[in-house]
Image: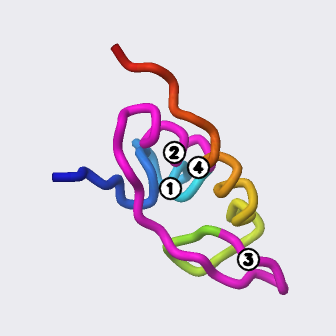
Amino acid sequence: MKILCHRGAWNIDAEKNSIAALKKSIALGYGFESDVRDYRGELVISHDIANENSPAVEQVFDLLSTPPPCRG
């Protein structure tokens, strides 16, 4: 079974969909669920309606292409 974090691993609403929340879910060994949306002609990651705080899809792809830290 794979555990997914909804909008990343977050504790307060302001952290949802943030790069920090996505990094945290990966560091904990979890996947995450979100959506790719258009915001002013740019692709961003946001589960809800995108806004100026939504991370660019390229940031998330860079994050996903970086090997996770060793857990052990």
Residue 39 percent location from the top left of the image = 75, 81
**Of callouts 2 and 1, the N-terminal one:** 1
Closer mark to the observer between disc 1 and disc 4: 4
Magenta region: 19-44
Question: Circles 3 and 4: CB distance less than 8 Å?
Answer: no
Amino acid type for the residue under numbered disc 1: Lys
Badge 2: residue crowd in 10 Å (few <14, some 14–19, many ≥20): many
Q: Residue at x 34, y 13 (%)?
A: 72
Question: Circles 2 and 4: CB distance less than 8 Å?
Answer: no
Q: Which residue is mark 3?
A: 43
Distance, label 3 to label 1, CA atoms, is 17 Å
Amino acid type for the residue under numbered disc 4: Leu
Amino acid type for the residue under numbered disc 3: Leu
Closer mark to the observer between disc 2 and disc 1: 2
Secondary structure at numbered mark 1: loop
* Horizontal arrangement in the rendering, residue 61 relative to residue 71 (left or right): right
Q: Which residue is mark 4?
A: 64
Closer mark to the observer between disc 3 and disc 4: 4
Secondary structure at numbered mark 3: strand
Question: Circles 2 and 1: CB distance less than 8 Å?
Answer: yes
Residue 26 percent location from the top left of the image = 45, 40
Secondary structure at numbered mark 2: helix
Distance, label 2 to label 1, CA atoms, is 6 Å
Amino acid type for the residue under numbered disc 2: Ala
Q: Residue at x 41, y 56 (%)?
A: 32
Q: Residue at x 41, y 64 (%)?
A: 33
Q: Is residue 48 above or below residue 29?
A: below
Q: Is residue 29 above or below residue 37?
A: above
